[in-house]
Image (spheres, rainbow, N blue to C red):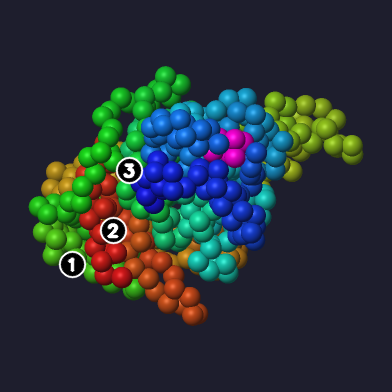
Amino acid sequence: MIKELHQKLSNKELKAKDLAEKHLDKIEKRKEVNAFLEVYRREALEEAQKADKKISEGKEIGLLEGLPCALKDNLCVKGRRATAGSKILENYISPYDAFVVGKTRQAGAVLLGKTNLDEFAMGSSTENSAYGPTKNPLDETRVPGGSSGGSAAAVADGQAVWALGSDTGGSIRQPASFCSVVGLKPTYGRVSRSGLIAMASSYDQIGPITQSVEDAAIVLDAICGKDDKDNTTVSKETGFYKNLSSQLGGKKIGIPKEFMEEDFDAEIKEMIERQAEQAKKQGAEIVEISLPNVKYSLAVYYLMMPSEVSSNLARFDGVKYGYSEALKKNSKSKDIMDVYFNSRKEGFGEEVKRRIILGTYALSAGYKDAYYKKAQMVRELIKQDFRKAFEEVDLILGPTTPTPPFKIGEKTADPLEMYLADIFTVPVNIAMLPAVSMNGGWIEKEGKKLPLGMQLIGKWWGEQELLNAALAFEKNESANK
């Protein structure tokens, strides 16, 4: 998609301004999907016209130049609202650009606006947003996944050519699976988190949501790199698009027996088995592997993540950032402690409060050693499991989600059932590995075709090998349609 549009712009078959208008009109016509929280119409058209001017002067343009994109609304854009899907930040204006936003601007991409998300990226359905749920464009009675549901829905519905999301426990890959697009979670440290409103700092990672593997490689090239404001980033070779080639022959692909022993939809299990057989036909060797400690992943994640949430969200106190109960005409706050408690009570949604309470408890005196520190130790065991597995195999194959997209409202009454939607994605964030989700097949339910997501997990810093294998799976899936 990106390459084709780039060629049309370069050949003057298409104007960037017309392309931007087409996408802006689609956003307006499809408001019921609720993919976008804010649209930058004037600025988008101005940026598109700059690309057109450059082309008219005979200058070369970059691959992303003049192409419309969307940003998850936990990424800061200078002079614009950054709500993180929360009431507590409804009036917060960012004074700076996130690192990836700066890189996106350098690439000449056209920023269409900000997309909806679960509040502070806490959720698996984009139903937790203070600004209403996003609908899945493939079936509007169902969720688009979360927390990057707005970004995935925008790309799937043709409201943006590509988008950026963030992935803390599967928040790029799970919505990509539910919306039948490609979602790439890079190795932790590959992409800077500077300017990302933090949820759980040792888990968060920014990545692309696109319509193809090739597009994901192009966007990853544009956004990664060393950043002095994020000391977890590293200088590594890129050129993912330039070195992209369809490669499965000779690869050893592992399927964790622990994944396949989980209780999940039979259709998804059959899809993974079918994809494994197709990989064999392309010269790959499929082997069963074991990740013995992966069964503790959800327990580790739902101890460590809320603990980091509790710490990161302490800054939202009704004084410096966003919403303050003290500014209400009928304010009940009599002193500074009242301002703290009342602002957080009214500004945060139920899921955010739940995770803050869980995290504060896990970090409290007498419990930190029993819970948080023990979870950190088990995290290292899970990393070791993956390290051993990658001594034997090149890549790991499994499902992205245990079910197809579920109905809006189906899981909101039971938080634990919602957390289980992350069972296959969370281990990747625990181990800080790269992974990609893509469509692996379809199932029909209630007269609608619903997507089934497959996930490929790569070695640390192994995005090139991961993308090359994903491209081979994608080509094979396209050939079988």
Q: CA distance from mark 2 to mark 3?
A: 13 Å
Find disc 1 in the rendering and name its residue: 277
Q: Looking at this rendering, what residue extends furthest in the right direction?
A: 330
Front tag of 1 and 3: 3
**Magenta segment: does it hold 109?**
no
Q: Reading the chain from its start, which is encountered first: label 1 or label 3?
A: 3
Picture coordinates of residue 111 (x, y %)? 54, 39
User: Label 2: how many residues lie within 10 Å, few (<14), some (14-19) or many (20+)?
Assistant: many
Residue at left offset 56%, top offset 52%? 22
Find disc 2 in the rendering and name its residue: 474
Residue at left offset 41%, top offset 66%? 451
Q: Looking at this rendering, what residue extends furthest in the top direction?
A: 228
User: Label 3: how many residues lie within 10 Å, few (<14), some (14-19) or many (20+)?
Assistant: many
Check disc 1 and give the amino acid type: Glu
Q: Reading the chain from its start, which is encountered first: label 2 or label 3?
A: 3
Picture coordinates of residue 177 (x, y %)? 41, 59
Check disc 3 and give the amino acid type: Ala
Find disc 3 in the rendering and name its residue: 217
Q: Which mark is residue 327?
A: none
Q: CA distance from mark 1 to mark 2?
A: 14 Å
Check disc 2 and give the amino acid type: Glu
The boundaries of the magenta stretch are: 43-48
User: Label 1: how many residues lie within 10 Å, few (<14), some (14-19) or many (20+)?
Assistant: some
Residues at circles 1 and 2 in contact by the CB criterion of under 8 Å: no
Residue at left offset 26%, top offset 53%? 471
- Callout 1 secondary element: helix
